[in-house]
Image: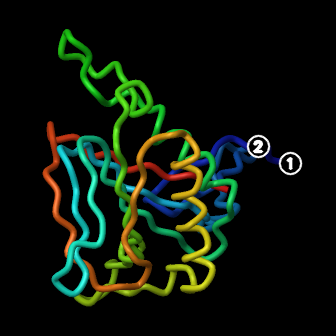
Amino acid sequence: MGRYVSSLRTGPTDRIRFLLNAGGARLILSAPRSNEVRIILQRTTGAEVWIDEKLHSSTGPGLMILFGTRTGDREESCAILADKAINLRIFEDPDGKMNLSALEIGAQIMVVSQFTLYADCRKGRRPGFSDAMEPAEAERLYNKFIELLAASGLVTRGGVFGAKMAVKFTNYGPVTILLEHDI
């Protein structure tokens, strides 16, 4: 009889569990696709969202967050990532070290929905989006994420879910971080 040894992450969404049998051979037990809310967090000097050539929303210095969900994602991931985003120490202290969080500096936050974060480019030259969440549930989670960020007291703005937007911002640092929460 074998025993469970470990999980190996083979890509952004694939895990393989191994079983070690009596002879020391590895047997693949499973390679499930995980469910992860995914955000790209960027430190910025300010951000603007334009829709139909009109300014929809803007923020001052702080964070630009691209928010994506996939089928099976749940609300608890939104809460965990919102907390991580506002508490992650990526802003510089007086000594130039990244020791301060968005909360500590009073950052402003712009959040834009981005289903293309789940583009599958493994085959061919045209990305597939079959892993992206259905729009109605994705919009609910997007709005929940914004609500959770705003509950921190930080100025939080968003785009319009599903709209064609021109997003303008300056990545300061540059600092760009990919955050995911696995369920």
Q: Position of residue 20 (x, y in %)?
A: 70, 45
Q: Residue at x 63, y 79 (%)?
A: 137
| Numbered badge on residue 1 | 1
Q: Residue at the location (39% across, 34% down)?
A: 102
> Which quarter of the figure has residue 97?
top left
What type is the residue that disc 2 sits on? Answer: Ala
Horizontally, residue 57 falls left or right of residue 94, namely right
Q: Nearer the viewer, residue 110 or 32?
A: 110
Q: Position of residue 51 (x, y in %)?
A: 25, 81
Crowding near the residue tagged with mark 2, few <14, some 14–19, many ≥20 C-alpha atoms within 10 Å: few
Residue 104 drawn above or below residue 30? above
Which residue ends up furthest to the right in the rendered image? Answer: 1
- Which of the image's four quarters has the C terminus? bottom right
Decide if residue 27 is on the left or right side of residue 131: right
- Which residue does the image show at 51% across and 80% down from the upper left? 131
Q: Are marks 1 and 2 in contact (CB under 8 Å)?
A: yes
Q: Residue at x 32, y 79 (%)?
A: 121
Three-letter amino acid code at the position of disc 1 = Met
Residue 22 is labelled as 2
Residue 72 percent location from the top left of the image? 66, 72
Residue 133 falls left or right of residue 99:
right
Q: Tell me the SS state at disc 2.
A: loop
Of labels 1 and 2, earlier in sequence is: 1
Q: Is residue 107 above or below residue 54?
A: above
Tell whether 180 sits left or right of 78: left
Quarter of the rendering containing residue 166:
bottom left
Nearer-the-camera pick, 112 or 151: 151
Residue 94, given in percent of the width and then of the height, sits at: 21, 11
Q: Residues within 10 Å of mark 1 (few under 14, many from 20)?
A: few
